[in-house]
Amino acid sequence: MLDPIDHIAIPVRNKDSLKATVDWYLSTFKCEVEYQDDTWAFLRFGNIKLAFVIPEQHPAHIAFVSAKAEEFGTLKTHRDGTRSIYVDDPSGNTIEIMAEN
């Protein structure tokens, strides 16, 4: 039902921490920035994607792709065109279920 992991979203403290974190990952791992604004950044490390998020704006989470994402509820269309829904497991961990494109 869940296919590959799309990305993992890791929390940062604030805007300054977001910038410092992105700069550190870029210089340490030579990754690429796919997207960045004041509240989150999306980095690609070959076939691995990490998002760094300010928790008050975006939840820390793990994102899976699923052909049956609609079975989890109403999907939200994001500004990049992806569609997903966020659900919490019994321990309160946030899971993003993304529709296949």
Image (spheres, rainbow, N blue to C red):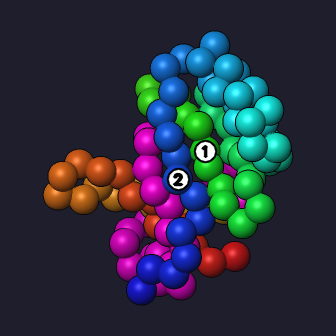
Say what secondary structure mark 1 lies in: strand
Which residue reaches farthest left?
90
Identify the amino acid type marked 1. Ala
Residue 24 lies in what quarter of the image? Answer: top right
Can residue 30 be seen here? The reply is yes
Mark 1, residue position: 51
**Disc ID at residue 1:** none
Mark 2, residue position: 8
Q: Position of residue 92 (x, y in %)?
A: 23, 48
- Magenta stretch: residue 69 in it? yes
Relative vertical location of residue 56 with respect to residue 83 in this rendering, above or below: above
| Magenta stretch, residue numbers | 57-81
Front residue of this view, candidates 53 and 82: 53
- Magenta stretch: residue 27 in it? no
Relative vertical location of residue 25 with respect to residue 83 in this rendering, above or below: above
Q: Which residue is at 69% across, 76% downward?
A: 101
Residue 4 lies in what quarter of the image? Answer: bottom right
- Circles 1 and 2, Cβ within 8 Å, touching? The answer is yes
Q: Position of residue 9 (x, y in %)?
A: 52, 46
Residue 90 lies in what quarter of the image? Answer: bottom left
Q: How many marks?
A: 2
